[in-house]
Every structure is written in C-alpha cells, then in structure tokens.
Amino acid sequence: MRPDELIAALNRHGVKYIIVGGFAAVLQGAHYITQDFDLCYARDAANLERLHKALERFHPVIRPNPNLTFDLASLQNNENFTLDTEVAEIDLLAYIDGLGDYTEVEKYAEGFQVRGQTCLVLSLEGLIKSKSALQRRKDLQLLEELRALMALRQEENK
Amino acid sequence: MEPDQILLEAEKAGVDVDALRYNLSLTPDQRLDKFLKALAWMDWAKDARKVEHV
C-alpha cells in the first residue's frame, strides 16, 4: 500500500474526499490492520471528473469484474467501487452507513496532516456511528477499540 | 458510561488499551509508519512456505 502517493494525487487534482473505514481508524490511533483504503467522495460532476483523473494514473481495475473499465461513464453510472490499483486496494463509497452522503460525512471529518499532505479523515465519533450501523461481526473488535480511544481522549482532556 | 468504565469493558473484550494509549502519543505520520511496517510484515508472512525439516 502506498497511501502517500494516493493522497498526493487526490489533493493535486482537488478531489473532494474523506478517508473513512479502517485506514481512518488507524490514523485516529486504532491498533488495526487493513488492506483497503476506503474513501467517501462527493458525487457532483466536477468531482467525478477530478476523481477519475486522479486515479487513472494508478491503472485501476474494477473488482470483482476486471473486464469492466473504470472510466468517467462508469463513475457517473455507479456509486460504489472496489478498485485494485498500483498504490492500494481502494473502496470508493458515495454513502456511508449510519452517516449518509459526502455532505453528511463531512460534518464528522477532521483535518489531518500526513506526510506533508492535508486530508480529511473521519472522526472517532463518525467511525463509531458508521461501524455501529453496520453491525458486522468483523467490526465489533474495532468498535471496542474506537470506544476505548474516545474514552482515552476524554481522559486526556480532563 | 464514564471513560474508566469504558476502558475496563474494552480490556475485558480483549482490547490492548496500553497499545492504544501509545498510539495516541504518536503523530499521524508515526501512526502511518507503524501501520505500514505491520502491513509489510503481514506480506512477508504471507509469502512464507512450509519446507521439509531435515
């Protein structure tokens, strides 16, 4: 996984995105391993173009059907993608369970500085809301971690 | 629930609270480094194969 390159490309093209899911949890301090880079993105026409331009240099292939092409038309016609790229396995999500679309998710986003790049990352509160809504067995341990991280932050602020 | 109670419950559920406390003391860059190192170890382990022991 080469998240630095991905974040730099998204920023260079001015894409409106928020890092969500397991990778956001890692940046927030979770003791967690994930192979996926989950992004929530805005669905306006200009952003779809910017997103497509930012990702095309990493030769994205749509999973589970590698015969489908990741082009602007596919972005316009579909909301969620799982992509294999040269830099990461990326989940593109237009909607986050428990939160909503990009505009709603943005309310729970925090600015982070990572390797000289500024990006929006889903907050602990947002992560807890989204993971609670999913009710997936695999998220339960992460949910416990996120609640503990929140409690540790509250202790720090006392 | 109070934070100390939440932490107690988390520990009971198997969460390594000390590891989280340590992570919170790191910068986002350091958290990313730590994560990428762990990921590299996982990739390395994935390539490991059993061989005949002589």
Image (spheres, coloured by chain):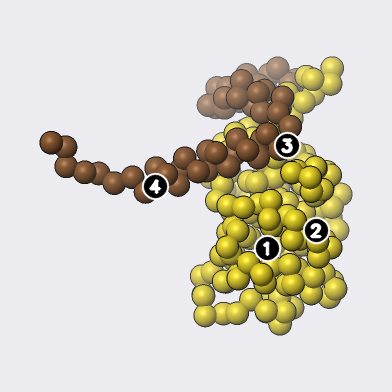
Q: Which residue has dot 3 on it?
A: B28
Nearer the observer: mark 1 or 2; the answer is: 2
Q: Colour of chain A?
A: yellow
Q: Which of marks 2 and 1 precedes in the sequence? A: 2
As rendered, which of B47 and A30 lies closer to the eye?
A: B47
Q: Which residue has dot 1 on it?
A: A92
Q: Which residue has dot 4 on it?
A: B46
Q: Secondary structure at mark 2?
A: helix
Q: In the image, is residue A77 above or below residue B16?
A: below
Q: Secondary structure at mark 3?
A: helix
Q: Secondary structure at mark 1?
A: strand
Q: Which residue has dot 2 on it?
A: A11
Decide if residue A77 is in sight here.
Answer: no
| Residue A151 occupies quadrant | top right
Q: In the image, is residue A101 above or below residue A75?
A: above
Nearer the observer: mark 1 or 3; the answer is: 3
- Tag 2 near tag 4, CB within 8 Å: no
Q: CA distance from mark 3 to mark 4?
A: 27 Å
**Residue B38 image offset from top left, x and y in percent:** 53, 38
